[in-house]
Image (spheres, coloured by chain):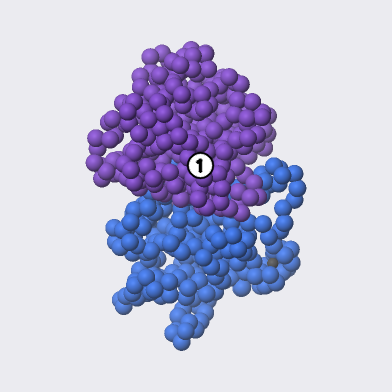
Amino acid sequence: MNECVNTLTPWERLQLIRHKEHPTINDYIPYLFDEFYELHGDRCYGDDSAMLCGLAMLEGRPVTVISHVKGRNLNENKKVNFAMPHPEGYRKSLRLARQAEKFHRPVVCFIDTPGAFCGVEAEERGQGEAIAKNICEFMKLETPVISVVLGEGGSGGALALGVCDELAMLSNSLYSVISPRGFASILWKDASREKDACNMMKITAEDMVRLGIAEHIIDEPIGGAHVDLCKTAENIKEYLLGVIAEKSQKSIDVLLNERYTKFRKIGEFEIRQKEELLDSK
Amino acid sequence: MLEDIFKVVKTRFNGKEAEQDVVSDTTIPENIMFKCPRCRTAMFEDDYIRNNKVCTSCNYHGRLSARERIRITADKGSFKEFDRDMISKNPIEFPGYEKKQEALREQTGINDAVITGECRIRKIRVVIAVMDASFMMASMGSVVGEKITRAIEYATENKIPFIAFTASGGARMQEGMVSLMQMAKTSGAVARHSEAGQLYITVLTDPTTGGVTASFASLGDIIIAEPKVLVGFAGRRVIEGTIKQRLPDDFQLAEFQLEKGFVDMIAERKKMRSVLSHLMILHNYRPEEN
Ligand SMILES: [Zn+2]
């Protein structure tokens, strides 16, 4: 549970996420799991290095791991396309989620992406369809799904791994409809107002809990996850063990109903009184 | 009602007589020109409208308002609107969001970017959702997400098909993360409608992009696109910015999506009622006599 209040501004948290020492999924895996076998390919087009999938042992319980992959430097980031998947990345994740369902394994998704890749080939291979299919199929996946935002979660490319029974955020992580830079550039036609956008978009872990999008905040050490990787990983692991044990006890019908309801109730609207209505004739 | 003065055009569909309205019969002052965004041909606005807003030169199927779409799609007098009075709040307190919406409501006569309801298409009962690009580029926020979800849930409960006429610039950024979550909400409703064995048809209209392409627009059992409409995930300018070169004119058009395997067919507006009703009949939905 959250022991101390996080006083960092959203902008300061964004700087932490961009810190070159900020841990990636590859740093966490040895601490979280006893074994990890990476599984490659979407069986259709290719293998996407921006999406890491595999089989892991979590304290004696097999789980399927699906994660965006960031690099720690420019070279690493070029290899993983800066954690921006192509359609085959999403199709790989769906293939392995279905495999997890077959073998009654929980799925653990780690979100850490600026968004799905925007490019000619991504369009040609159906980026929209690939993300849509993930979202729709995860909604009815008959096994527990837990998602954890490690750093940044950006737009539909993040949500593709975010349809889950419970969403947890690392205490400095951010989850947004578009990057603060994109937000400033589209809504204010001024990308240099990135910092203003970041601070007003309501994208922190606390905001996500308030909006009903996340259920849990995982503590990072003071100074950020990189200050004590071992401790951060321990906190993630403790959370996963608890939530997986809890969700695994539920019947599939209950689990799927609760998953549907979790998303069903998000939205802020009202019904305007008749007399206030505009005459549209 | 304006409807009373719309021309009724008698069209023959496979020997059967059917009534179909043209999109609009308002008098257009002479000399107002429409320039086609695809072939750049200029034509009289009057001719364009009389051709149901289809380019007379290249067959580009232009944008319709939701009301115009309903008028040429639903059997006359059969449309019953759902949730007409629903309006959005301001979940991230984006400055000026309420004001902007208020102005658009006045300007467009609709409360948000989608109209949903139940109607008949050649006597077959169906639930439809029609997006309207004139309201904030039909971006998807709380109201669009909620109205579409309710419409699909109604179709699931009543065991009737659902047809979405999509158009969207993507997520409603002014509503922050709440808007992104509407992708999950609507897709969840589609999943349940599908598991209940009901038919879902999407009709992609100009332009269908972003979060709507990456959710319910791509999930139809059958995906139809109108000719020459824009369909894609990422915006053209975003991609051009990444690759530092101009994309070909036909990139992300309906015909491109057909070639790449992401739409089932391209259907012309004047045949849409016929196509939709026949597809429903092929799924064992029957016309009802009143
Ligand atoms: Zn034209």
Q: Is residue B214 above or below residue A146?
A: below
Q: Position of residue A270 (x, y in %)?
A: 39, 43
- Label 1 marks a residue whose chain is A
Asked whether residue B97 appears in the rendered view, the answer is no
Query: What residue sits 68% from the left and 34% below the top?
Result: A190
In the displayed structure, does residue B108 sit left or right of residue B247? Answer: left
Image coordinates of residue A209 in percent, x first then y, are 40, 29
**Residue at 41%, 13% in the rendered image:** A4
- Residue B258 picture location, percent across and down: 58, 63
Task: Write down which quadrant ligand 1 falls in.
Answer: bottom right
Left or right: A211, with A113 as reference point: left
Type of amino acid at the residue the image marks with label 1: His
Label 1: which secondary element: loop
Residue at numbered disc 1: A40
Look at the image and give the colour of chain B: blue
Residue A78 in the image: above or below residue A8 = below
Q: Bin the neighbour count of mark 1 within 10 Å (Cα to Cα): few under 14, some 14-19, many 20 and up.
A: some
Give the x, y percent position of residue A140.
35, 47
Q: Quadrant of residue A105?
A: top left
| Viewer-nearest residue: B57 or B237 | B237
Q: Quadrant of the C terminus of chain B?
A: bottom left
Q: Is residue B197 visible?
A: yes
Q: Which residue occupies 70% across, 72% down?
A: B57
Chain with colour purple in the figure: A
Q: Is residue B158 above or below residue A37?
A: below
**Which residue is at the front of the view, A179 or B89?**
A179
